[in-house]
Structure formats: structure tokens, C-alpha cells
Amino acid sequence: MMQQPCQKTILLDALIAAKPYGISTVYAIEVLGILCPAARVFDLRKRGNEISVGRTTTTDSTGRVFKNVAVYTLLSSGEL
């Protein structure tokens, strides 16, 4: 049985792929399946990954608008 990647791995891979645009909290929840992206960003930062946070307004897949949504951008990578 194959083990699924952990949420930290999924998020770090997505941040690398999304450079320089970043990943929003809404995207992380809906598409990546990460229910608490802020906690995974905290974990990645503890491992030496430099991740900035900005804020934006975005829309989810149902058309609902969210204001002041966090957008995480990987500036430099450390460990997983």
C-alpha cells in the first residue's frame, strides 16, 4: 500500500510550482486539501523555509467572495 504525501510536502511542492505568485488559503483548502494552511506554513518555516504572507480578495469554486485571504509565497527553501 502506497503512503500519501504529508500536507507539508503537498504545500511545499505547490509553493515551489506557484513561484512567484503564491498559494492562497482558499486554494490550499479547496484544491490541495489542506484544512489549516497557516499551521503547515508555520511547520515549513520552522524547517528553514522562508515564506512571506500577503493578503488578497479571492473567490472560491462556488463563487463566494472572501476578503483579506492569506497568500503564501516561497522566497527560499530549506528543509521539508
Image: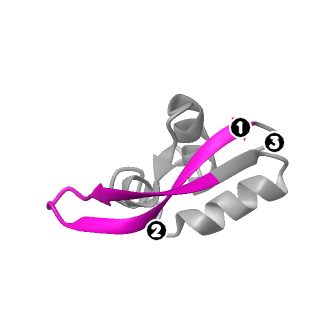
Please give the name of the residue rendered at 66% of the width and 58% of the height, measured from the top-left corner: 41
**In the rendering, at what x and y percent does residue 48 appear?**
85, 47
- Read off the residue under disc 2: 35
Q: Residue at x 59, y 66 (%)?
A: 38
Which amino acid type corresponds to the residue marked 1 in the rendered image? Leu
Q: Which residue is mark 3?
A: 79
The relative height of residue 70 versus residue 1 in the rendered view (above or below) is: below
Answer yes or no: is residue 1 visible: no
Q: Earlier in the sequence, mark 1 or mark 2?
A: 2
Furthest residue in direction left, as rendered: 62
Q: Which residue is identified by label 1? A: 75
Q: Position of 17 compared to 40: left or right?
A: left
Rate crowding at label 2 as few (under 14), some (14 to 19) or many (20 or more) other CA atoms within 10 Å.
some
Part of the protein shown in magenta = 53-76
Label 1: few (<14), some (14–19) or many (≥20) C-alpha neighbours in 10 Å: some
Where is residue 17 shown, x and y percent of the image? 52, 30
